[in-house]
Amino acid sequence: TILDVKRAKRYDFSKAKTYTGNKTYDNATDIPANGVFLSNLPNPATTEFYTVRLFDSTGCYTDSTVAFEPRICECPKPVFVVPESQAVCEGDTLRTVTGFVDSGVTVDWYDAPTGGNLLLRGSILFKPTQAGIYYAEARDTLTNCKSTSRAPSYAFINELPSFQVTTNRSTCNNSAAQNNGKIALTRLKNGTKYDFSVGTSYTGSRTFDTALDIPRDSILVRDIPNPVSSQSYTIRIFGEPNCFTDTTVTITSVDCNCNPATVSVVPSSFTICEGEPFPVLVGAVGTDITVDWYDKDGNLLKANSLTYQPNFFGEFYAEGRSLVVAGCVSSARTKAVGAKIGQPTFTLTTRPATCIGDTVLNDGQIIIENLKDGERFDYSLGTSYRGGATYETAQPLPTDGIIGALSNVNQYYTVRIFNRCGLFYDVTIQTTHNDCSCDKQNCLPLQMKMKKKGK
């Protein structure tokens, strides 16, 4: 490339240390606008020399010689990564990986040993965000030459141990509590060792290497004394590499005296339509007490359950039973009653309109009495129901059972009462006319006599 040209307009060159051409200004080549007179030259095996002669319009010239050196392209050495492998527990952060390379070399990070996706370009530091194998490739920043192989860095994330813990409190011998409580392990995953401490947090100092092997029977703590009120224990389960999970359980005191209270059952009674699901009966009891369910004849329906769902109508009885004192039951069984809603039944009576003197009021009444399994009503004139009401459109039953404001006439009324089960029942009754006029035979003329009073 010809640079910093002053007064010269044309050029020629020779591939030699001196100019060997025979050009003059008249037949030389114009200098390119960008100064480039040779391009796409192959990389020479040895040093090559070029001599350039620049001419001005007067015929004067100047020579300049340049050496074209061969470029030796050596690929950079593979990256040395630290750490080559790392493992952390679930929830912990993976360490940043460092790629060590020579000066003038950078690192590109990939997700495969060859090809793959470029994760990060031009950085010696890389921070993994998830488990996997990451590959570091060295790259010369000047030539873009790359290392012949990529260095792997392994990242592992170990799952934390998962498990459940069950407790067995002290048993009773007559009325004395025994010191035989237990804490056992169930549904263990990713754990092989354990330790425990008394209290609501782990205060021990064991690691995976020093922790205890989990027993074959999975009982971690045994022969626990019956506490005065309650006592907490914190269990730590270890998995590799020193991953652990803690859980805290509480052992409560056992009362070995027989004192189960009477069971409270909810609901104490229920009524349902044919085909509707039966409600679940719930027995409310205290600690260390379960419930046994019986029918009216004393047959056991369900044992050791705080709930019972009947599948027939009738009477059901709940009995409390101690879980720690054998044979200790509540002094009485609590009854719950379940009945099927049937067709409504009721009776009607009437009260005639009221007389005030010889004036009659339109306040005749029909009174609904002895109602069972009814919720809404409608009525129509005549000896049969002619209305179009359904359960959804009928009126709610009056709280006092009175259908009032009826005309003072001899009239038949048919009352229909509905319930939510789609059942109804009709009753017909006649109201009678009330004659409020005086009987003429009993009417007497009113005579008035006036006196004049003077002083």
Image: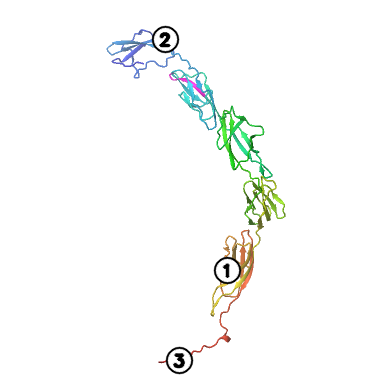
- Counting from the top left corner in percent of width and height, residue 400 is at 58, 67
Say above or below: 48 vs 366.
above
Which-is-in-front pick, marks 2 and 3? 3
Label pair 1/2, CB-CB below 8 angstroms: no
Q: Residue at x 59, y 32 (%)?
A: 195
The numbered mark at residue 451 is: 3
Determine which quarter of the picture holds residue 440.
bottom right
Say whether residue 48 is left or right of residue 62. Answer: right
Q: Camera-side residue: 226 or 69?
A: 226
Location of residue 102 with respect to 133 vertically, above or below: above
Q: Position of residue 26 (x, y in %)?
A: 31, 12
Image quadrant containing the C terminus: bottom left
Magenta run includes residue 192 = no
Q: Earlier in the sequence, mark 1 or mark 2?
A: 2
Pick whichever of labels 2 and 3 is earlier in the sequence. Answer: 2
Query: Main structural element of the magenta stretch: helix, strand or loop?
Result: strand
Could you give the CA–CA distance between mark 1 and mark 2, rounded to whole angstroms?
124 Å
Label 2 neighbourhood size at 10 Å, few (<14), some (14-19), many (20+)?
Answer: few
Name the kind of residue labelled 3 in the image.
Lys
The correct choice, above or below, for 167 with respect to 421 in the image is above
Residue beneath disc 2: 47
Say few, some or many: other residues with alpha carbon within 10 Å of mark 1 (under 14 / 14 to 19 / 20 or more): some
User: x, y (%) of residue 229?
Assistant: 59, 43
Residue type of the residue flagged with mark 2 = Thr
Instruction: Calculate the distance from the C-alpha at mark 2 to the C-alpha at mark 3.
Output: 168 Å
Q: Are marks 2 and 3 in contact (CB under 8 Å)?
A: no
Instruction: Please provide percent x and percent y for residue 373.
Output: 63, 61
In the image shown, does 245 or 251 lie closer to the viewer? 251
- Circle 1 is placed at which residue position? 403
Left or right: 243 with respect to 37?
right
Residue 191 visible to an observer of this rendering: no
Residue range in magenta is 135-142
